[in-house]
Amino acid sequence: MAAAIAIIVEVGGGMGLILGFKVRWATLTLTLVVFTLAATLIFHNCWAIPEAQKMRQQLLFNKNIAVIGGLLTVAAWGAGAFSMDGKRSR
């Protein structure tokens, strides 16, 4: 069940971002942000693993934090003029 929910969130949210459809709604409801943060904390816990595996997990942890920052930037500024949302507002 969790895998099905993850697929829906990732594919649906990703397609919404690519197409520029309801971008602020998707990110302001924080579905993608919360999902990415939860996955980061659960699967990339670089503080609780052996030193030999730490570098890779820390890299993936930092990447996901950067993705969250990008999602929050899109939530703040919107999808842009060439998105579906931008064309509807004209």
Image (cartoon, helix red, strand yellow):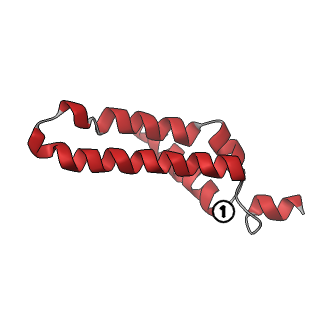
Q: What residue is rendered at 76% in x and 62% in y?
A: 84
The residue lying furthest to the top in this view is 48
Q: Is residue 79 visible?
A: yes
Residue 35 at x, y percent in the picture = 48, 37
| Crowding near the residue tagged with mark 1, few <14, some 14–19, many ≥20 C-alpha atoms within 10 Å | some
What residue does disc 1 label? 19
Q: Residue 61 lies in what quarter of the image?
A: top left
Quadrant placement of the C terminus? bottom right
**Residue at 16% across / 34% down in the picture?**
49
Rendered image quadrant of residue 42: top left
Percent x, y of residue 6:
45, 41
SS at circle 1? helix
Q: Is residue 86 above or below residue 49?
A: below
In front of the other: 76 or 36: 76
Expressed as whole percent of the image width and height from the top left, the position of residue 24 reads 70, 47
Residue extending farthest bottom = 82
Q: Is residue 1 visible?
A: no
| Above or below, 2 relative to 88 | above
Residue type, numbered disc 1: Leu
Work out whether 13 lies above or below 38: below
In the image: residue 54, left or right of residue 42: left
The image quadrant that residue 21 belongs to is: bottom right
Q: Percent from the top left, x then y, of residue 31?
A: 57, 38
- Identify the residue at image location x=78%, y=58%: 85
**Residue in the foreground of this view, choosing between 2 and 44:** 44
